Structures are given as structure tokens and as C-alpha cells.
Amino acid sequence: MSSTYGKSLKLSIFGQSHGAGIGMVLDGIPAGLKVDEENLQEFLSRRAPGQGGHTTSRKEADKVEFLSGIVDGFTCGAPIAAVIHNSNTRSEDYSNLMDCPRPGHADYTAQVKYGGFQDAAGGGHFSGRLTAPLCIAGGLCLQWLSDSGIRIGAQILQIGSIKDEELNACHPELDRIDSAFPVVNSDAGEKMLDAIAQAKAHGDSLGGIIQCYATGIPAGLGEPMFGGVENRISEIVYGIPAVKGVQFGTGFAAALAAGSENNDSFYIENGKVKTLTNHCGGILGGITNGMPLVFSVAIKPTPSITCEQQSISLSTMQSASLIVNGRHDPCIVPRAVPVVEAAAAIAIYDLILSNTQTNKRK
């Protein structure tokens, strides 16, 4: 399995949904960086299950235990290893999945690739549960980026067909989306929650779009072609289960615009180069231009739904009906918001480390 990310830092994620624990190892981090464990735990609580009617009823404390890399509240230069112990598992809910794969899940593809040796309980290593250790690494990177004046925040831009207002791409006010259900327009937020409740009542689920912003990003991060900022962010964001699309700036809408509409005109403000608009999402040629970084992420509907679905029996090679048991989110989008923030933070911090090393070579 490929569960490692990074160029200058190396992040490895391990564990299965219903195993003894899940965790991460983060290598390549400089010594002497302050770690606020209370702040990190608060960040993880935003992703944790069992919060309100729009999330799964599975409750996990997600208490982080550091095994190495941190001494007296500071990084010591050794790899940072951390683990979260699983406690609230019900593996019996998944006993039939080796034979009858769930539509929309990795049950069938995992069976083909690993030949029955995979852990199917709770989705095993493919589970959204593995976003918790991603949030450990991302939560740490968010702290270190904040110390450099870089802020990252994300909003729920859309649930189903219900859309929120976007923040100003040139001057995103991140405090406006600093809430448990991060939307700009509270009326739109209420409609989203109602839609999630209706989907749950019908045994169904909803997807949506998360829009992420990063401010304080210096110009010059990234490389052309395969080392571009879009490449590096997309690589880690696509590692989040349920992500089906990533676009930067106006994304696909740029295909409908004329060049005169899509180009971001330059100007000078207080001796700094800026643009009047930010259709490019803060990236040109794979390199940051100093404007806020803006990208959006499409999240598919939770594939675990309680209404009856058509599947197959792999043992008989016949059609079979399936009703999914277990505890699942009717909409994963709200809990995915901090995960997207975490992924962005890891990618940006890795880019900064890589840029520092490039400058040293000069």
C-alpha cells in the first residue's frame, strides 16, 4: 500500500478502522518547533465522529498519544510518531462484505488487489477513519504555519444542490467561517442541515463541495510541470476518502471565460505585487504568486446508505441485494472540512521546506 506523502517532509499513515489503533509518522521536521497539544486536540475534535445528527453515531475520543519526536513541548528533530487507540468498533457489522461488496466502496477493488487478505472491517485501511492521523500531521503543520503568518480555513460551499456564498478570493475573511458548521450565509447553512436530515430519514446520503483558502502565502513556492503547487496539493487531497475532484481558483469555469475575463491584472500595493482578481487561485505556472491560495474539493455522497442496493455474491457470481449495516455519516462534508485544511497545511509546509532547501543550494 502507498500510504506515504511528501518531498522534504515524509508523512506515513498506518492502521485500520477497526484495528487496535491508527497513527502517523512525520519525518523531516526541524528541531525546536513548539507543539501545542491542547490546540491539536481541539483541532481533531472538529473531525471526530459522534457530534450531532449529521454525523455517524460511532463515538471515538481520538486522543493523541505521541511516541517520539517531541520533548518538553518542542520538536527534537527525530521522527514524530503518534497513535490514536480505537475503542468503539463493531466489526460484526461488516462480516458479509468479503463476499458481497458495497457499491461505492473499495470492497471489491481491495478483494481483487489483495486476494482476501485485506481487513474489510469498517473499510480497513481505506476507511475515512484514517483521516484522523492525517489531521494530527496537518494540525501540527497548521500551528507552525500560523507562527509564520500563514492561515488556512475552509467553508462548506455546497451540500447537494444548496450553495453558500463564497468568500472574497482576493481578501478572504477567514473569521467568517470559523464555526462548527462553517458557512458564510447562516440561512444556507440551515437549509443544508435540513437536507442532510431528510437524506438520513430516507436512508440516503448527500455530498458537497468544500472551498479552502490559505492567506499569507509567499510568492515563489512550487515548481513548474510535475512539482507545481496544484500537483502537490492535489496529491494529498486525493488521498482523502470520498474526494472526487479538485479545482484551483475558478477551475473549470475558466474554460467558459474569455482571456480578457480570466486574466488577473497586476498592480502594486505598498511595494508588493498583487492582482485585481484571483481567478488563478494564487498559482501561476505551478508557482505561488503571493495572492491567497484558493481551491475547492468535491466530496461524493457517503456510499454507506441504509436503503437496499444491488450488489453481487463473489462466491456464487450471482446478483445479490445488500443492506449496509454499521454506523455512518449521512453527509461526510462537515467532518471533511478540517481534513481538507489539514491536507493543505501539510502540502504548504512541505513546499516551504522544499523552497528553503532550494534557496540554500543557491
Image (spheres, rainbow, N blue to C red):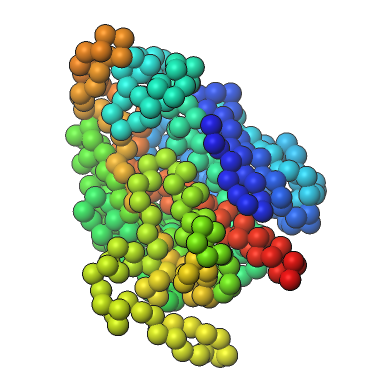
**x%, y% of residue 259?**
30, 78
**x%, y% of residue 123?**
43, 27
11 on left or right of 318:
right
233 on left or right of 306:
right
87 shown above or below 277: above
- The answer, for residue 74, to whether it is visible in the render is no
Give the quadrant of the C terminus.
bottom right
331 on left or right of 80:
left
Identify the residue at image location x=37%, y=42%: 242
325 shown above or below 254: above
Q: List the single residue furthest toward the top.
A: 316
183 vs 300, nearest the viewer: 300
**x%, y% of residue 170?**
42, 76
Q: List the single residue furthest toward the front.
A: 225
Identify the residue at image location x=75%, y=55%: 30
- When asked about the image quadrant of residue 44, the answer is top right
284 vs 207, nearest the viewer: 284
Identify the residue at image location x=53%, y=75%: 290
- The answer, for residue 193, to whether it is visible in the render is yes
Numbered-mark total: 0
**x%, y% of residue 132?**
53, 40
171 shown above or below 51: below
342 shown above or below 215: above
358 vs 36, nearest the viewer: 358
Identify the residue at image location x=24%, y=22%: 311
